[in-house]
Image: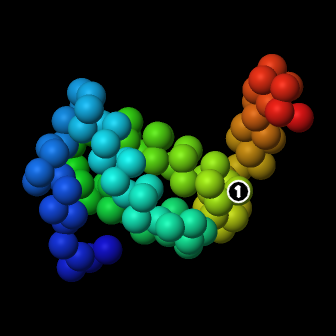
Amino acid sequence: MKGKEDSPFYDLYGRSCALPPSFTAPCFLFQKSTGDPNFYVEAIRSNILGAGDTCSRAIFLGAIIAAANGGPPQHWVDKMDKTTVERVDRAAERIADLVGAS
């Protein structure tokens, strides 16, 4: 991402922790993804370059892009320790059971 220009979106709508910018910024990046599963990494990195409340935006942004594309990139998952991946998978299964999605 070195040398890449910050999105003009952040200049228009800010880098705030508050709503609506913390909601609209991830939505803006998501709509640019057009279903491209490789866009996950670029969108998260673009969010980081936006500065401000990157963590709250990244949680929402990562969730909606992963949901639309079947999960985060496998090469990112492979970098996590196995215990954490297992705990996340168990939690996801429980949530799916609670909402009847299993």
Name the colouring of the figure: rainbow
Pinpoint residue 23: horizontal percent, then vertical percent.
34, 37
Residue 54 in sight from this viewpoint: no
- The tally of labels here is 1
Q: Does dot 1 land on a helix, a strand or a loop?
A: loop
Residue sitting farthest toward the bottom: 3
Pinpoint residue 30: horizontal percent, then vertical percent.
44, 56
Residue sitting farthest toward the top: 98
Residue type pointed to by label 1: Gly
* Left or right, residue 72 beside residue 50: right
Pinpoint residue 98: horizontal percent, then vertical percent.
81, 20
Q: Residue at x 67, y 54 (%)?
A: 71
Mark 1 Cα-neighbour bin, 10 Å: few <14, some 14–19, many ≥20: few
Q: Looking at the image, is 38 positioned above or below residue 55?
A: below
Q: Residue at x 84, y 26 (%)?
A: 100
Q: Looking at the image, is 86 positioned above or below residue 69?
A: above
Q: Residue at x 45, y 47 (%)?
A: 61
Q: Residue at x 47, y 40 (%)?
A: 59
Q: Quadrant of the C terminus?
A: top right
* Left or right, residue 33 beside residue 52: right
Which residue is labeled 1 in the image? 70
